[in-house]
């Protein structure tokens, strides 16, 4: 459960987020909105890269923003970035091991935890390849494996499907859909692809200019005239 | 308490020259993102050219104009031809590349004009002004007014003119500026011109006020950088305050004999204090979308096991065979090569594993040597303990002084290490290395200097060479093994991207401290090895430029493969010996190394070692492809 209350972020005079409040409880939640709406800003506040001016974020009842940035992964906050971030001079196995180094293992052997995550995303065969030799889709899968290992609470993904072929995107979609069942984590998915969002997200939060303009079951949200206006802009104004 | 006012006034005037140079740095950094560390070298070139032309009998103003024009033309050349090739690199790489440019210009000046101290007279030297009851030459008065007027003028220019507006736009975001129609290249060019003109003018003034010599003038960039750091490399108002403050602090130390010898360390201490103040706000991460500076070349270097096998084989062959074939002189030189290789490894670890640029490793080498010498002369303890103590001391020294910058972005770390190297130069040339004397400094002021011998288990030169090979090989082994541990994986994440590392739970500062401590330890051990190789060390042999050369040659040698630091050792120790044998001016080597650094950063990121490895792979592949055919023919 992610509880966001009155969250505001300011860049100079510009509001990146404007008194945003939302209780995100669905297993997979979409985060959509036009460019500059504040989607990535929300992820960055949660990671600690951007400082809030007001508000709180609670994750499973704990004040997320009070936890030091580099302890949030161990607490259960995991994420991927818009640009892929696989370490090119580490093998696939060591890419995952590097993430596990900073997460408590609760007594499980490292080998098992890494192997399970790689098995789940379907990269077990490639453990010895170096990051530099992976293609775009394999890199995304390695990144997801880094996120889902060892008891995550929330996995945040920033446009994971960008630049993949149709079959690769299908596999990725299956992987994302299965995350809550695999490890019990909530998924927060930022994407522009409305098809993807409407297929896999139970709920969707729509942002525009840093404010919440709609939040609820995905199908209802996407029908909302305000959402259509934000996406299609002037069309409704012209019609009116 | 002595009367300080004459020192304050003269300090203000010198400070104004630092302001001029600092304004050039900031204007250029804001517009183009390049911190031009060649600023001082361009000033030196300008001053020397002006002197040369006046010496030839031409009117003095012709010399000034020609000098400033030359500095400007070179700055523009670099800005238009070389800098764009690095436009997508990290700010650290772009700044470090200008060090290559500085080496080329400095090597040229030294080659052409030598180290002969000259003085550059200006016609205004003959007139005097009276300020606050203190008489100063009109030149100093003019310098002060010019410093203030130029800075204020530049502030107005950036705020009011169209070009200034474009420059501010560029400073904000280059790509968006280009998209909305700011002529990026033209604005860039103007920024280089402004910085070139200011470097020339400040060079002429400083040559007049201090001395006309290429190396000290090249270091003009240090107080300028220190002043710029006060304004986080962007504020011009802060440059005025910083430049004047450094000038005054430096000058008022003169009448106090306790600190007078160390007063040229002022800019280093000033910049260190400023960074200490700035980093209190917490960790500063590099931008998430930033292109990482250090290229990955894992595939070009092979696996750990391959590297280990070949490296250990080469070390074993060298240790056994070299003492039989090399002359006494070359054996000693080879020992130095291997020792310097270990120091270069300390640069390579930081650069290749974490993407950190340290410009103070040769100074840490000196710290290790100092401590080893001091302990040997003081207590005659076993050499191995000297070695360890030298390594630990250098490690602790580096971490204490580097810590404020480890929390900040990489560019600040590079600058603070440059400051450490510069401050070390000032202190060690005043204190000197221990050679058996009394007191804490262990320095003999009357009588013969004592030598530190080789360790008892390796008394002969041949045995000491083998001893050094074993110690250095151990150093390489330790580094390779650490790369396989948790620390090595954290380093790899940090190099990939600092925000990603943090998001994956890495304590960035802690792992950077670990890396810098290990690098300091390696540098310190190599310094101790060198002390026992030569017997003593010379306090004048540790200018900051040696640390810069150490970095440059590590990049040229190749930081990603074990052989890279050894190539760096060869280039730093064997090549100068060869040149002396062949009667070639060593300054040519400096120019070549400067150009080599640029070449390596722009087109050959894996350096000599990467190319050698690629070549040997190619030969092996050709050979294995040809083998079956040869075999067939024989059958």
Image: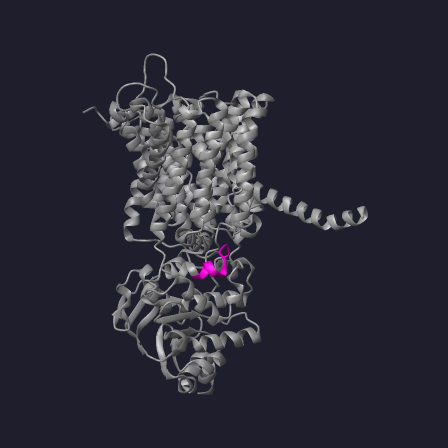
In this picture, residue B444 sits left or right of residue B197 = left
Asked whether residue B181 appears in the rendered view, the answer is no
Instruction: Say which quadrant the N terminus of chain B sits in.
Output: top left
Farthest front residue in view = B635
Q: Position of residue B313 (x, y in %)?
A: 55, 39
Q: Quadrant of residue B389?
A: top left
Q: Nearer the viewer, residue A12 or B342?
A: B342
Asked whether residue B167 appears in the rendered view, the answer is yes
| Residue A92 on the magenta span | yes
Q: Position of residue B585 (x, y in %)?
A: 56, 24
Q: Quadrant of residue B359?
A: top left
**Colour setting:** one colour
Q: Quadrant of residue A237?
A: bottom left
Q: Nearer the viewer, residue B538 or B106?
A: B538
In this picture, residue B335 sits left or right of residue B257 = right
Q: Position of residue B29 (x, y in %)?
A: 44, 47
* Highlighted magenta segment, given as a residue range: A88-96
Tally the numbered discs: 0
Farthest left residue in view = B1
Up the image or down, A45 lies above or below B133; here it is: below
Q: Position of residue B403 (x, y in %)?
A: 32, 44
Up the image or down, A149 lies above or below B138; here it is: below
Q: Nearer the viewer, residue B437 or A110?
A: A110
Up the image or down, B384 lies above or below A78; here it is: above
| Residue B558 on the magenta span | no
Q: Nearer the viewer, residue B372 or A22?
A: B372
In this picture, residue B26 sits left or right of residue B381 = right
């Amino acid at each position: 459960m992610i509880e966001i209350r009155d969250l505001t972020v300011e860049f100079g005079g510009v509001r990146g987020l404007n008194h945003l409040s939302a209780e995100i409880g669905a297993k997979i939640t979409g985060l959509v909105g036009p460019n500059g709406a504040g989607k990535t800003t929300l992820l960055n506040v949660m990671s600690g890269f951007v400082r809030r001016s007001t508000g709180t974020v609670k994750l499973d009842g704990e004040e997320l923003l009070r936890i030091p940035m580099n302890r949030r992964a161990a607490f259960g906050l995991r994420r991927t970035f818009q640009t892929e971030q696989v370490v090119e001079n580490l093998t696939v196995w060591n890419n995952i091991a590097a993430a596990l180094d900073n997460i408590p293992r609760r007594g499980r052997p490292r080998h098992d935890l890494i192997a399970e995550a790689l098995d789940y995303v379907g990269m077990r065969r490639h453990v010895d390849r170096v990051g530099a030799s992976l293609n775009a889709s394999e890199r995304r899968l390695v990144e997801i494996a880094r996120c889902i290992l060892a008891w995550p609470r929330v996995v945040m993904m920033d446009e994971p499907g960008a630049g993949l072929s149709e079959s690769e995107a299908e596999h990725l979609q299956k992987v994302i859909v299965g995350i809550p069942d695999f490890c019990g984590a909530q998924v927060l998915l930022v994407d522009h692809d409305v098809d993807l969002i409407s297929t896999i997200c139970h709920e969707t939060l729509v942002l525009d200019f840093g404010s919440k303009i709609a939040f609820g079951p995905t199908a209802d949200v996407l029908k909302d005239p305000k959402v259509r206006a934000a996406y299609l802009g002037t069309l409704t104004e012209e019609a009116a | 308490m002595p009367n300080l006012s004459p020192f304050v006034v003269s300090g203000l005037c010198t400070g104004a020259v630092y302001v001029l140079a600092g304004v050039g740095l900031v204007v250029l950094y804001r517009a183009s993102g390049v911190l031009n560390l060649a600023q001082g070298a361009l000033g030196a070139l300008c001053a020397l050219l002006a002197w040369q032309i006046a010496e030839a009998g031409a009117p003095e103003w012709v010399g000034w104009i020609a000098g400033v024009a030359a500095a400007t033309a070179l700055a523009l050349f670099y800005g238009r031809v070389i800098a764009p090739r690095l436009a997508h690199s990290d700010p650290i790489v772009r700044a470090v590349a200008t060090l290559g440019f500085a080496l080329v210009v400095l090597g040229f000046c030294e080659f052409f004009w030598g180290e002969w101290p000259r003085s550059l007279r200006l016609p205004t030297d003959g007139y005097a002004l009276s300020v606050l009851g203190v008489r100063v030459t009109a030149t100093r008065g003019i310098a002060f007014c010019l410093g203030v007027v130029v800075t204020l003028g530049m502030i107005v220019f950036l705020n009011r003119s169209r070009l200034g507006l474009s420059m501010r736009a560029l400073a904000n975001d280059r790509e968006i500026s280009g998209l909305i129609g700011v002529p990026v290249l033209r604005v860039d060019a103007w920024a280089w011109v402004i910085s070139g003109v200011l470097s020339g003018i400040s060079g002429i003034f400083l040559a007049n006020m201090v001395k006309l010599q290429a190396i000290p003038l090249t270091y003009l960039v240090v107080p300028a950088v220190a002043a710029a750091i006060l304004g986080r490399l962007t504020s011009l108002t802060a440059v005025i305050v910083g430049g004047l403050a450094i000038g005054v602090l430096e000058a008022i130390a003169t009448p106090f004999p306790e600190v007078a010898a160390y007063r040229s360390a002022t800019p280093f201490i000033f910049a260190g204090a400023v960074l200490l103040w700035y980093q209190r706000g917490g960790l500063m991460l590099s931008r998430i979308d930033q292109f990482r500076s250090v290229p990955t070349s894992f595939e070009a270097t092979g696996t750990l096991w391959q590297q280990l096998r070949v490296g250990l084989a080469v070390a074993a062959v060298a240790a056994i065979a070299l003492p039989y074939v090399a002359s006494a002189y070359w054996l000693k030189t080879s020992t130095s090569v291997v020792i310097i290789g270990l120091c270069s490894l300390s640069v390579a670890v930081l650069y290749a594993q974490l993407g950190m640029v340290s410009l103070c490793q040769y100074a840490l080498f000196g710290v290790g040597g100092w401590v080893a010498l001091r302990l040997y002369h003081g207590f005659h303890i076993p050499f191995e303990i000297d070695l360890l103590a030298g390594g630990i001391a250098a490690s602790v020294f580096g971490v204490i002084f580097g810590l404020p910058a480890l929390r900040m972005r990489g560019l600040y770390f590079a600058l603070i290490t440059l400051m450490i190297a510069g401050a070390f130069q000032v202190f060690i040339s005043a204190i000197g290395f221990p050679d058996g004397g009394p007191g804490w400094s262990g320095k003999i002021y009357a009588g013969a200097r004592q030598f530190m011998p080789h360790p008892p288990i390796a008394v002969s030169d041949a045995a000491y060479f083998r001893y050094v090979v074993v110690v250095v090989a151990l150093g390489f082994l330790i580094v390779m093994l650490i790369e396989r541990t948790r620390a090595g994986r954290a380093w790899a994440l940090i190099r990939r991207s600092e925000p990603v590392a943090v998001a994956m739970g890495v304590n960035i500062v802690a792992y950077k401290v670990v890396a810098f401590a290990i690098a300091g330890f390696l540098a310190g051990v190599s310094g101790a090895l060198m002390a026992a190789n030569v017997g003593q060390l010379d306090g004048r042999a540790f200018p900051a430029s040696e640390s810069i050369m150490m970095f440059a040659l590590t990049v040229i040698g190749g930081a990603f493969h074990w052989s890279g630091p050894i190539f760096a050792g060869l280039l730093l120790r064997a090549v100068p010996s060869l040149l002396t044998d062949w009667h070639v001016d060593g300054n040519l080597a400096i120019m070549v190394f400067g150009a080599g650094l640029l070449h390596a950063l722009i087109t050959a990121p894996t350096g000599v070692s990467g190319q050698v490895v690629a070549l040997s792979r190619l030969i092996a592949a050709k050979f294995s492809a040809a083998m079956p055919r040869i075999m067939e023919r024989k059958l």
